[in-house]
Amino acid sequence: MCVILVITLTENFFMNLIEFYSAFHDPLWVILLSSTLFLPVRKLIWILYVRKKQKIQKTVSDEEKINLKKRATFTSIFLSIVFSYLYVTQVFN
């Protein structure tokens, strides 16, 4: 009796997980992929911003680097989410 109860509870638990996964499949993958892409994209964009600024000014202060990093953070968040959404919709659907 106890074994049958444990088996039924386990089956219900896994069925709930499967239903949850199928309902939230795309958003989970978008969040996972965009969070994985965020740091490398931010670093790349920040380096490009700093090099562009160095061409104009020759030297870039630490305060300017901080401001450029904030700009790169916003841009990378936007690009990571958009790219992840487009990728997941193309690959999984």
Image (spheres, grey):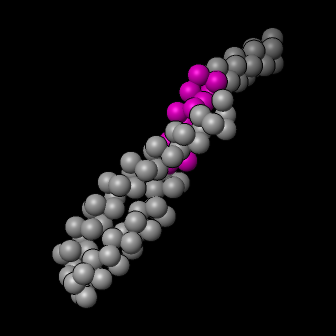
In the rendered structure, which segment of residues is drawn in magenta?
20-34
Does residue 47 appear to the left or right of 31 in the view shown? left
Which residue is pictured at 33% across the width and 71% down the height?
Answer: 49
* Residue 1: quarter of image: top right
Name the spot of residue 43 as percent of width and height, x first: 42, 68
Q: Is residue 58 above or below residue 20?
A: below
Which residue is pictured at 39% across the width and 74% down the height?
Answer: 47
Does residue 71 appear to the left or right of 29 in the view shown? left
Give the tally of numbered discs: 0
Which residue is pictured at 70% across the width and 19% down the height?
Answer: 15
Q: Is residue 21 above or below residue 47?
A: above
Does the magenta-highlighted stretch encompass residue 3? no
Name the spot of residue 64 as percent of width and height, x first: 20, 74
Can residue 55 be spotted in the picture?
A: yes
Does the magenta-highlighted stretch encompass residue 28? yes
Q: Is residue 40 above or below residue 32?
A: below
Does residue 73 appear to the left or right of 40 in the view shown? left
Name the spot of residue 74 as percent of width and height, x first: 32, 54
